[in-house]
Amino acid sequence: MKDYHINIFYSEDDEGYIADIPDLKACSAFAETPAQALAEVLVAKESWLAAAKANGKHIPPPMYRPVIYEIT
């Protein structure tokens, strides 16, 4: 099974790192370092998936891939 793509980027406005999972709406985390942001978004992912399952919501399959992976 493929896993969800995770973006990690520095936010000048927030002065920290943001990690998000594009396939899971509003699943993101903030931290002072990229490693901390990754750890936090992995916790957020598990919570997101558990909440969706508990409420009978649709869980989207991993689909998002950045443009850099597209073959031209």
Image: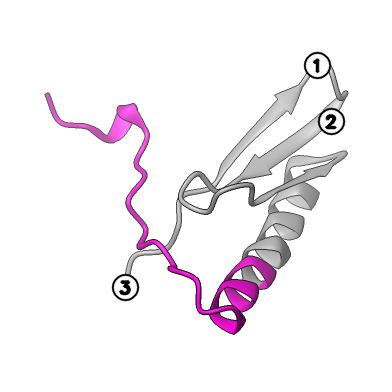
Q: Check the image and report above or below for 47 versus 12.
A: below
Residue 53: x %, y % from top left: 54, 80
Q: Which residues are magenta?
A: 47-72
Left or right, 71 with respect to 53, comes to: left
What label sits on residue 1 in the rendered view? Answer: 3
Q: In what quadrant of the picture does the N terminus appear? A: bottom left
Q: In the depicted view, which residue is nearer to us: 32 or 24?
A: 24
Q: What amino acid type should be assigned to the residue bearing mark 1?
A: Glu
Q: In the depicted view, which residue is nearer to us: 47 or 51?
A: 51
Residue 32: x %, y % from top left: 88, 39
Q: Residues within 10 Å of mark 1 (few under 14, many from 20)?
A: few
Q: Secondary structure at mark 2?
A: strand
Where does label 1 land, which residue? 12
Residue 70 part of the magenta segment: yes
What label sits on residue 4 in the rendered view? Answer: none
Q: What amino acid type should be assigned to the residue bearing mark 3?
A: Met
Cα separation, mark 1 vs mark 2, equals 7 Å
Q: Earlier in the sequence, mark 3 or mark 2?
A: 3
Q: What amino acid type should be assigned to the residue bearing mark 2?
A: Gly
Q: Check the image and report above or below for 61 versus 9.
A: below
**Residue placed furthest toward the left:** 72
Residue 14: x %, y % from top left: 86, 24
Cα separation, mark 3 vs mark 2, equals 31 Å
